[in-house]
């Protein structure tokens, strides 16, 4: 069947440079071009602050096989073939345990750097991947018209709390070919596909990019171009292409491990990164999910190895980093007829960092008895995902106006689970 492509759109203020592996979004007026001296001062100041890294598990991870409630009799009744045997679960607290493929995270749990929030998720009942991801990235469940992402608004709230704070073009970064929904908005964001592809002096794409901006009649777009090239110059000066991970930081092969390694590169290069985003796909396990081994186990191995390697790589600087993971919804409690699970409701979130009150499963567990299930089929939600993200934005980025970050959520400090220490 032939593909019907949409008509070409004129170049707008939201500009992408996919071929050169760099994208910048800035939909409001761009600040005066930053000089090298100002950038250096801002970089030093921001490098001393806390950083927030957000990981999206796209495809709806099966939270019940990720953090297993192995003391729940119903869990094994619902899943005769894909449940994790109790003797193979990595015990956490006598009730919950990690999937055996997640062994790299157990030392972080033991050191109380890793916390878990189970039965968390979006209150919107949709089972559509597209809608659920959109709602979680915008931070407005059930509202499709939201123009920006929650993490971009968190940075806007940070500006409101500290209007005189200086920032660099690397304030907000995403690993990928374009800016994700989570970071769309007024605050400029840079998307990096691969830091090794950057070149100002020799890349033909960079020359064409410069010419495009030089001849643009859009002053805001032109300003974005200038900041883009300043970002490239900063990146070259830091020379992350020569980066060697710290001893013991064994990143898994593949896109996710590479994304986390590059985030570590950028954070350790003191470029002024304050918020970073990466995602990992492959969680939609409708069939052949597997139990202790199989499709899900492979994803969890990459996921846990990547996070553990990132933590090791950051060394002492990990104390200033908070990582939060999320997925659009969980999976059904009962396995289906093809050895998998279908779209569910509540899920599990991980929070990793130096200020995390770790070694605990936070939130209220709703139970898995038939009468306790959501719509008779799914784990029920007892923690709105915005409570977790709101606390992370407040205590990591200093975003005080949570009504701006998550409108209509009625968030305040009383809603926090106290996952992060002040």
Image (cartoon, rainbow, N blue to C red):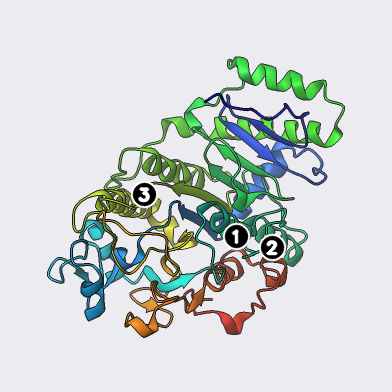
The residue at 61%/70% (across/down) is 394
Q: Is residue 147 left or right of residue 182?
A: right
Disc marking residue 158: 2
Label 3 crowd (10 A; few <14 / some 14-19 / many >=20): many
Disc on the earlier residue, 2 or 3? 2
In this view, the residue in front, 304 or 370, is 370
Disc marking residue 43: none
Quick check: 406 above or below 360?
Answer: above
Give the secondary structure at mark 3: helix
Quickly name the residue at label 3: 313
Quickly name the residue at label 1: 135
Residue 216: give x, y in percent of width and height.
83, 25
Label 2 crowd (10 A; few <14 / some 14-19 / many >=20): many
Q: CA distance from mark 3 to mark 1?
A: 32 Å
The residue at 49%/73% (across/down) is 420
Viewer can see residue 365: no
The residue at 80%/22% (across/down) is 214
């Amino acid at each position: 069947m032939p593909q019907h492509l949409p008509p070409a759109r004129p170049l707008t203020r939201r500009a992408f440079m996919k071929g050169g592996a760099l994208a910048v979004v800035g939909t409001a007026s761009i600040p005066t071009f930053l000089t090298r001296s100002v950038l250096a001062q801002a970089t030093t100041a921001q490098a001393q602050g806390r950083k927030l890294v957000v990981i999206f598990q796209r495809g709806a991870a099966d939270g019940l096989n990720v953090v297993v409630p192995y003391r729940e009799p119903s869990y094994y009744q619902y899943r005769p073939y894909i449940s994790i045997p109790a003797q193979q679960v990595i015990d956490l607290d006598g009730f919950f345990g990690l999937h055996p493929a997640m062994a790299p995270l157990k030392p972080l749990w033991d050191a109380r750097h890793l916390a878990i929030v189970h039965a968390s998720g979006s209150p919107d009942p949709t089972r559509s991947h597209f809608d659920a991801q959109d709602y979680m990235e915008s931070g407005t469940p059930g509202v499709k018209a939201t123009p920006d992402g929650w993490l971009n608004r968190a940075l806007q709230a940070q500006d409101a709390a500290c209007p005189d704070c200086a920032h660099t073009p690397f304030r907000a970064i995403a690993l990928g070919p374009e800016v994700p929904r989570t970071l769309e908005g007024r605050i400029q964001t840079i998307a990096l596909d691969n830091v090794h592809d950057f070149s100002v002096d020799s890349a033909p794409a960079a020359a064409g990019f410069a010419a495009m901006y030089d001849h643009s009649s859009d002053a805001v777009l032109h300003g974005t171009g200038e900041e883009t090239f300043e970002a490239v110059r900063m990146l070259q000066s830091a020379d992350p292409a020569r980066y060697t991970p710290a001893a013991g930081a064994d990143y898994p092969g593949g896109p996710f491990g590479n994304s986390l390694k590059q985030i570590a590169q950028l954070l350790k290069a003191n470029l002024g990164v304050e918020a970073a985003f990466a995602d990992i796909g492959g969680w939609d396990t409708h069939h052949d999910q597997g139990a202790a081994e199989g499709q899900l186990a492979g994803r969890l191995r990459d996921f846990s190895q990547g996070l553990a390697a990132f933590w090791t790589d950051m060394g002492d600087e990990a104390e200033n980093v908070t990582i939060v993971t999320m997925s659009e919804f969980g999976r059904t409690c009962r396995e289906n007829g093809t050895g998998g699970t279908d779209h569910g409701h509540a899920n599990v979130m991980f929070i990793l960092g130096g200020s995390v009150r770790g070694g605990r499963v936070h939130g209220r567990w709703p139970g898995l008895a038939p009468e306790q299930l959501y719509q008779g089929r799914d784990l029920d939600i007892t923690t709105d995902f915005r409570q977790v993200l709101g606390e992370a934005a407040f205590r990591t980025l200093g975003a005080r106006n949570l009504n701006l970050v998550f409108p209509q959520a009625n968030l305040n400090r009383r809603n926090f689970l106290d996952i992060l220490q002040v």
